Every structure is written in C-alpha cells, then in structure tokens.
Amino acid sequence: MKFKQFLKNFSYAFSSNLISLLISAVIVFIVPKIISVQQYGYFQLYLFYTSYIGILHFGWFDGIYLRYGGLEYGKLDKQKFNSQFVMSFMLEVVIALIIWIIGVFQGNPDSRFIIEMCAAAIIIMNMQQILLYILQGTNRIREYVLITIINRFVYLGGILLCLVFQWADYRYFVYSDLLGRMVTFGLAIYFCKEIVFTKFNGFDFPEMKENINVGYKLVFANFTSMLIIGIVRYGVQFRWGVKAFGKLSLTMNLSNLMMLFVTAISVVLFPVLRRITAEKYNLIYRHMRTVLMVTLFSGLLIYYPVATILSLWLPKYSQSLVYMGLLFPICIFDGKFELLVNTFMKTLRLEKMLLKINVIAVLVSILLTIFNVFVLRSFSFVMISIVLILGVRSTIGEYYLQSKLQIDLRLRMVEEWVMTGLFMIISWWLPFPINMGVYAVVLVGYLLLNYRDIKESIFYIKGMV
C-alpha cells in the first residue's frame, strides 16, 4: 500500500477523531454541569459496564480481524462471513437475555436499569463491532470513520435535547448513547449489506472454531487491559462510593481525550503493516515512536489551561480536578502501548505475550488497589497508581518488542519516565501559570536533547510519501 493512501486514510481517521474529541469535550463540559454528582456517577457506571461488553464474543471477532485483516473487501467470501454474522447474533441474543434476567432481580432500581440497558447494548455494540472490524481490516476506513462520526453526533444531539428540555436524569443520557449506537449499527449493516443480506448457507462451526482459536488470546488481552484501570475504579467505588467514582471518571475522561489522536493512527496502521515486509518494522517503529512521544509530551501543555477553566466551570468538581495533574500523563504510557506495542504485537502475531503482559499489569493493579483501599486510603495514590501501572505495562511490553525488532531504546524509555515524573511534580506543587511555564522549559530541553532523532524521523516519514 502506498504511503499516500495511508495518509489519506489517516486524514479520514484523524478528522473523525478530531470531531469525536470536540464532541467528547463538549459532553465532558455539559453533562456534569446539568446533573448531580451522584447522577453523573450512575451514568459513568453504565459506561464503565458497557466498556466490558466486547469480551462477550470470546475472541470470535478478533479472530476474524486477525485472520482477514489486510484483504480487500471485494475478495471476501460473503457467505462465509454471513454465517459468522448470523451465528454470532444468535449467541449475543442469548447472552443479552441472561443479563436482562439478572437485572430484573436487582433490588436497587438504578442497578436494575443499568444492567437492563447493558443487556440491550450487548447485541447492538457487539454486532456492530464485527462489521466495524470487517471495514477496518479491509481498509474501508472512510466508511468506518463515517460510522464513528455519526455515532458521536447522534449522541451529542441527545445530550443537547436533555439540556434544552432540562432533563436532569442520567437515564436520558443512557438512552442517547443507545440511540447513537442503534443508528450507526444500521449504517454498518448498510455498508456491509453484501455480507449481512446474502443467502444464509448454514452454520459454519469449523470457521467459528478457527476464529475463536485465533482471537481468544487477543480478546482476553484486551479484557485484561481494561481490567487494569477497571480494578482501580472499582476500588474507588467500593471505598469512596458512586460520587467519588463519578469524579474519578470525569478526570479520566479528560485525561483520555488525547488518546483519540492515537486511535486515529492505530485504526489505519494495522492493515498497512500486514501488507509490508517485516524487515521494515524496526525502522517504522523507531521513527513513529519518536514522532509520537514528541506529540504526546507537547500535548501535555493542554492540561494547564484546561484544568484552570474546568475548575471555574465545574466548581463542584474542583476538588477532584486538583488530582488531574497526577493522572493526565496516562496518555503517555497508554498512548505508546496502544499505538506501538499493541499494534505491532498484533501484526507479529504475539497475542500470547500481549496477554501475559496485561495479566502482569492486572496483578500489579490488584495489589496496589488492595493496599490503597484497606491500608493507605489515599485518593492521591489512586491517581499515581494508575500512572505507575500503565507505565510498568508499557515498559515491559516495549522492552520485549524491541528485542524482537532488534532495536535498543532503553535510554529513551528512561527519559520518558523522568519527563512524566517531572510533569506530575510540577503540576502538583506549582500554581497556574507558573507550572505551565516551568513545564514548557522542561519540554524545550527534551526537544533539544532529542533534536537529531526528531529531525531524522520527520525526514524519514516525509521521504515515504
């Protein structure tokens, strides 16, 4: 695949994620303003639960993505994929019914509502996911992006209606989320209509088994990846309640906004890597890494004005926003891991090692959460522990991947730990705008120190066009 095509697809994905970033930012500013802290906590609890729905296809869709990623859509066996779509739909309906029944027997009406809505989301989200994987894996990025954009606009439309009519109940935000997913599920069906509406040719169990055998390690790697932070968040809910859970969620939502840029690249990178020779991976990895880290460390400057504005806009969250300076650097380690380590390991078919790395991080998360919830009981340590856990995972994963690619970037990894630590110290101890000025000086020093590598990486990327 020509690099110009890569840039074209990246522009689609980046535009989509830029729009998603703006919409997410609007939602982050609006929703906590119009509902109570407790209501916001319940809404975040719904989003928290639905984030784990993807495991309920047990690697089936990930296997399809790994096995057929890089092929052209027109060359796919439509009847084979139709069989997988129908069979997986039947499975998701059964799982959703089980979850729905569990919800019916919940005594707390809010818990019952959240579980029942999650049951509905299981079918919509997972069946949309198999179609999104097909579009992404076959490089139909434009259609993939359109689905993402429309989803966010419908969701935003629902939020704005709640604002206009003053519906200060988290249930309406849940309905808005589900409505957005239903609309884009229908659009995904339209884009993959040759698969969804082709003649059903029976149940293809051998194909299902092969897909699950290939994909289960990746889906459980993704599941454990979500558990890393999920355990910490559950510990916050257990120790400090739903209100504290909502405040932590707001801070994490803000910290994760930068990850949308990383997602834009990863969406188009996997099918591209599948089509080029493995000998080029080390060069691509090294130069992409350099540009990514410069971008992420520069992006940390956004924290200072955003935190100040939010403290004025959301005074009831001002206490929790103080901790944002400790949590904001998660985009450094999480961004590097998701874009580079995760994508390259999937390309090199190292799902088993990816799972092992995430399991180690989960164990570290469990130990730190237990220590904090029952011994230390510090909300500050919650934020620091999240950065530490993601940092350890990123370091282990990158160290292993570098040995596979035969490159040595250990000095750069040490620099990044130092930069992250300095950002956290500066943000915690110094007031605005002094903290922003001091970090800007540190950033300039980092750029000068790595000037030669940065220049070489930019030159290399330009030369690929």
Image (tube, rainbow, N blue to C red):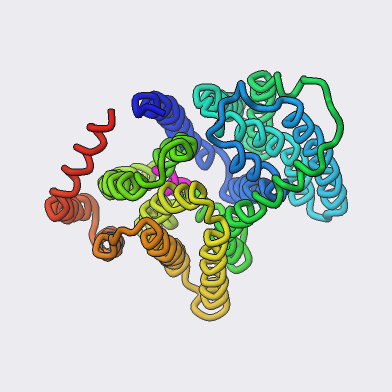
Q: Is residue 145 magenta?
A: no
- The x and y percentages for residue 38 are 61, 51
Left of 114 or right of it: where is 438?
A: left
Does residue 55 sit above or below 240 in this rendering?
A: above
Q: Position of residue 32 (x, y in %)?
A: 52, 42
Q: Is 284 in front, or is 91?
A: 284
Question: Which portion, as a residue range, is magenta?
Answer: 253-258
Quarter of the image with the N terminus in it: top left
Q: Position of residue 368 (x, y in %)?
A: 51, 73
Residue found at x 80% / y 32%: 86
Residue found at x 74% / y 49%: 110
Vertical placement of 114 versus 323: above or below?
A: above
Q: Dividing the image into 4 quarters, which one contains the C terminus?
A: top left
Q: Is residue 132 left or right of residue 465?
A: right
Quadrant hosting residue 151: top right
Where residue 34 appears, as percent x and y from the top left, is: 54, 37
Residue 160 in sight: no
Picture residue at 70% right of the left edge, 27% below the top: 77
